[in-house]
Amino acid sequence: MDRLQDQLTILKSWLHWLPDPVVALIIVLLAVVAAYALHRTVRHALQRLLATRYPYVFSVFTRMRGVTQLALLILALIIAVPVAPFDPATAAWLTRLLLIAVIALVGWTALTALNIAADLYLRQFRIDTEDNLLARKHLTQVKVLMRTVDVLVVIITVGAALMTFEPVRQYGVSLFASAGVAGIVAGLAARPVLSNLFAGVQLAMTQPIRIDDAVIVENEWGTIEEITSTYVVVRLWDWRRMIVPLTYFIEKPFQNWTREKSALLGSAFLYLDYKAPVGLIREKLKEVVKASKNWDGNIVGLQVTDAKENTIELRCLMSAPSAPQAFDLRCEVREKLIDFLNAEHPEALPRRRQVAIDERPHDEEVAPVPRTGRQKSAAKTG
């Protein structure tokens, strides 16, 4: 870069016959072109060296491409602006812009480095497996924390850039002087933002929900699809999306079907006649469940859980490796047991019984009942 500064100084002496604004513009443009050319040369050299031998390192450099390009551009302008013959006001204005650019570069570098580190950390966990509880735990924790950190980095970067302006700095001093009232006003104004921010940190640490958890929210069944810094996207069973604020999962009750493990118990109820052969139905249930691909091989059973006036209630209980498979297994059990009862034991299906009442025809003569002696004397007396 010293060489670049020397060359720009020599170029300035050569162009002394041109107006100063034109010379300054030429020097700035040449500095920008030199920075871009240097970045492109280094990128091609690293591509030849690292693309095949160290692909991960090269992918990191590729993701940092914008940051490094901006860094070289700012560095070239920092060298070129003092050399260029700008008037004092323009030079001060450009210096202020370069200071803001450096602050933005630091913030962008921090964001990019944190995201690269998070992606490299998550490479060791796979979420596309059956037993993915640990992977979902780390994925949720890293994603939520990264979004919170991103917000904080952006806020700090914007605040640092604004503090370079004298009026804003004076306002900040006066604001700190009246910290009591200002704190209350700012707290009330930023309460939704801060509550969601703190809720995100709490969700990341305690993890009542994780990515791909099966939940019931507002009487709707779905899975956690995305957790942002302010809301959660729940993918419902019919592909709709429910958008829920982060604070909901801290302040209100909900059901999480995969909190500790993804395996679930599913139940299917049958309402049958009292003549239903419970033993045969139990054996048929075991046969159906063992032949199903949705069963995890752990639990299967049948019990009579209630006896009502006209029917008995049978509960079929079976386990499955995940919530969707548990739902499919329940439906499969209902269908095949109903087919089995219709084909082989129709008497087990519920039916309505009627009490038969023997009624005589109205035109049929009823034989008189012979009276006793006391009844005859009572009739004469009456």
Image (tube, rainbow, N blue to C red):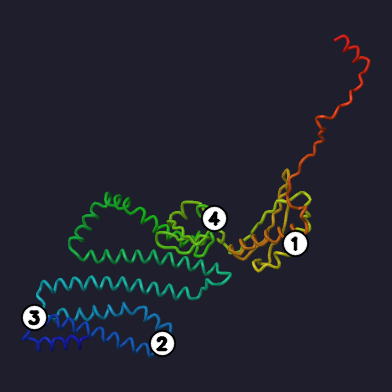
**Are dots 1 and 4 in contact, CB under 8 Å?**
no
The numbered disc on residue 284 is 1
- Looking at the image, is mark 1 or mark 2 nearer the viewer? 1
Residue at mark 4 to residue at mark 3: CA–CA distance? 71 Å
Residue at mark 1 to residue at mark 2: CA–CA distance? 60 Å
Observer-nearest of 320 and 43: 320
The numbered disc on residue 255 is 4
Residue at mark 3 to residue at mark 2: CA–CA distance? 45 Å
Give the residue at mark 3.
20
Tag 3 secondary structure: helix
Q: At label 3, which amino acid type do we have?
A: Asp
Q: Indicate the position of residue 5 as horizontal and vertical percent values.
A: 18, 85
N-terminal of the pair, mark 4 or mark 2, is: 2
Give the residue at mark 2.
51
Residue at mark 4 to residue at mark 2: CA–CA distance? 47 Å
**Are dots 4 and 2 in contact, CB under 8 Å?**
no
Quadrant assignment for the N terminus: bottom left
- Above or below, 80 against 337 in this view is below
Tag 1 secondary structure: helix
Quadrant assignment for the C terminus: top right
Observer-nearest of 138 and 378: 378
Judge left or right: residue 299 versus residue 370.
left
